[in-house]
Image (spheres, coloured by chain):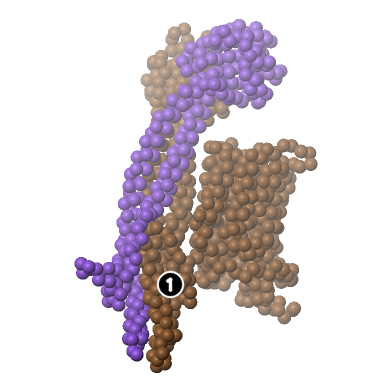
Amino acid sequence: MTLDRTRPLFIRLLLLALLVLVPPVALLAHGAMDDFARGLVPEMDKKAAVVGRDLASSIERAVNYGIPLDKLHGMPEFFEPVLGANREIRYLAVTDRDGRILFISGADAALLAPFFSSADFDIAASRKALIDNFVDITQPLMFKSALIGHLHVGLDQDYVQSRVLEIGVDIGVVTLVSLLVAVEILLFVVTFNITGPIRAASTVMDRVRHGDFSATCGVTSEDEVGRFIHTFNAAIRYADGLFRRLEAYLDEVKTAHFDKTVVERVAEIESRIRFLFRFSRSSQPEVVNEHQATDIRLPLFLFVFAEEISRSFMPLYIRDLYMPVDWLPLEMAIALPIAVFMLCIAAISPAAALVSARRGSRRVFLIGLAPATIGFLMSALATNVWDFTLWRSLTAVGYALVTMACQSYIAQASRQQNRTQGLGVYVGAVLTASICGTGIGGVLAERVGFAATFMISAILAVIAGLLIHRLMEAAQPAQDAAPERRVAFLPLLRNWRFSALVLFAAIPSKIALTGFFFYLMPLSLMRSPDTDLGDIARMMMLYPIAVVILSPLASRLADRMGWKAGLVAIGGLIGGAGLVLPMVSPDSDLLGLAIVLLGVSHGLSASPQLAMIPDICWTECRNIGQTNVLAFLRLTERIGSVIGPFLAAAFIPLFDYTGAVVALGWVVLGMSTVFALLSFAFGSGPHIEAEDTE
Amino acid sequence: MDRIEQPHGTTASVLPPPRPVRWSLVRKVSLALVSILLSTLLLAGFFAYYKFESVYSSLVQSRYSFVVFTIKKRVEDNLNLGLALRQLRQVQDILEREKMRDAQVIAVEIFDARGEVLFDTDRGAIGSRVAANLVEALKGAPGQPFGATDEDALIVGLPLVNNLGKVEGGVVLRYPAVYVNYGVSGLLLELSKGILRNLVVFSILAVAGLYLLFGRVGRRLDAMERSLNTVMTNGGPAVVDRPGDAFEERFADFVAKSREAVDHIHDATQEVGRLDRLQ
């Protein structure tokens, strides 16, 4: 295990976290599921007895009117509403004294007949038996104190199992989220407490190895690493102190000694020492701090987690807040806060980047948290769509400031390291937070309600702020010179490759994300009576999971094969085709598949889209900087983010919910097809012809 | 060289005494890991409990809904004969029979569309008015049971509708809230025990694992610190515990260079002193 490398220590810690987190939750879940099953069965039996007793008394009343049991009419119609209203009751049957089935609803008579005919039913008491996958509760039918037959209420054994399984799935999501949170926290603990300080010590060590004693390591923690660094710094200070004493002595001899030869000899000694070693000019050595992109990962993770918590139920919450207005239909009202949120991010992000570069990431992060936290808090208290839209706009302002502050910090901290690695830290934190927030948000909202879940978002945002405030006080990387305010972006649009990428790849990709994933998905899934918020959340988790898995692979593939436009095209086509799938059947499984394919699509195309920029905008990158070109791409693609919800809302009255998904799919597929065709003309390598035309 | 001879002959370190470790790595990471474990167990327990509570209470509610449904059917059969709700005297017997069948039923009552109680298993309540929320609930779908809560009772009810579709009143059944609480309290107790047991066992495991992991880190840092101290005080080469480890080798170079600087400065100081003494 090397102390200055995060991975070995982190992997060991992760294994320990797996060992410590998974078995106890599995044991708890196992125990809870057993107790759950044991607790439900008596209550189900009671219900079956009540239903059986009531139905039996109705049948007995009819028989008492003189209608023979086997001549009763309309029994299926009599059973039907009972079966419809009680999902756990799978069948209702009436048998005669010999166990022959006279009437049955809900199950195949052939399946039950052998059991009913062989069982000893010649008793006038209710009884319980297991038949195949059913629990059969038998109720005697009496006429003038004589047994004339039996009423059978069949309970579905799978009903208990499926409810038990729901607990298992919920706990599974909690475990996954906990593991991901543990990964983030442990990564932070390792880098902040061990590898970061040790790397800072390494930097100072390298300087000392070259005779430079002008720096010490700026670590003040009170753990073993802090103690080591304290002794390490003490050694440098000791050497520095000896040198100061020597320096003073040299000065004294040089100025006071009358013998010029001695003075010359002393000056020689001084120059020899100064040649061999370097000490700080003042007696205050420079303090070296190691800034890493990972410093900001945990606060960023918590903040994005806070935002993503509402992902799975946002349209449902807006629907609840909607009060009918003639000129604003429900569909458009639901689209409004989602689109305004995206618009505000697009509008604020460029300014946020500038402010962040000038004022420092820490300060901008903390400034951004104020509107975001107020936005989360007030979203919980919103009473209609209008004030909710206002509070979401405020959250968007905070979101833009915080994310730009993080990007700025990462860009500065990863200057000496690898920029791609820094970008990976950002994307990793955002996607992991997306998985956790989406997964846990739906389950939480199901239990505690939408408003309380927004409150939890506010609390998480505050925790992120506290982390930044306490831990990053001294850890600010050196600021870049503030970027130029005015950069001419419009010439970029004259580059047809860039315009094609924006129009036919980036924008449709965002239309699919906000129109389908953010807007239509929760609304479409919630229409199924068997689907609850937890189910929606679990399905929506599939998107970030697919992106997390595929994104690094796509990056590597794009780098190795240089086939970036092709990957973007294939990604777009897959995403569009996925959305068209519900055309085959409106089944929620196909919607789930559409989510996975959207994740595959974005996983394949997101990194190559960025990687293409230096090739297709070679001249522009050189003129206005690659960062600015990428920022412009991100800005223009947000047009799709804003259009997406409105487009989906416009399609609903025309094609209904599933039809709207398909219609959106055709739009995305059409635009992606255009990009795929154009991508053949993209060629490969840097395109410098744009320079010739200018 | 600054070797400070103590009166009893030991050599004191030239470096200041090591800073005490107040928050060891094990303690820090244990706190993080045990907090995550506690949150995970609490969240998992919370979800399991509420799922059970919701399924259990809906099952109890649906059982009583069925009882209410059968009363509704009988009352509506009479209403469809053209009788007024107030005139259905036999309804009182039906209500009392249903209450007799289940000891958990607190009361069953029928009230008219204005909220006046017409029949009640508690005969003393006849003529009183039901809570406004129950009258309001009649405006819902006629076939859908509605739920409400009283001080210590849960209420399930259904509207009574005549064959012209007019809501004539409602039938409600009250059952004790404590019945559901009692049903789910067993699971809550088991979950609490499970959380506590798992927390204790796996926290011990976590701390033991972290001692193993960070104990090694601490020992390595401690060895390097001692090596630095020894070399700076007594001279000699720095001992590399793990040859081939880039960090330790760099550290050994650092120690050697620090010592070299100290020696050079010391020699230079002595030389300057010697020259200074030359008259």
Locate residue B159, reporting x and y percent. 63, 20
> Between A53 and A112, which is closer to the camera in this rendering?
A53
Q: Is residue A139 left or right of residue A357?
A: left
Residue A230 against residue A687 in the figure, above or below: above
Locate residue B129, reporting x and y percent. 63, 14
Question: As drawn, which residue projects farthest toward the left?
Answer: B8
Residue A169 against residue A42 in the figure, above or below: below
At horizontal 39% and vertical 58% (from top left) the residue drawn is A222
Across the whole image, how many numbered discs are drawn on residues?
A: 1
At horizontal 34% and vertical 90% (from top left) the residue drawn is B279
At horizontal 37% and vertical 39% (from top left) the residue drawn is B196
Q: Chain of mark 1?
A: A
Report the amino acid beneath label 1: Val
Colour representing chain B: purple
Q: What is the quadrant of the N terminus of chain B in the image?
A: bottom left
At horizontal 58% and vertical 24% (from top left) the residue drawn is B148
Colour representing chain A: brown
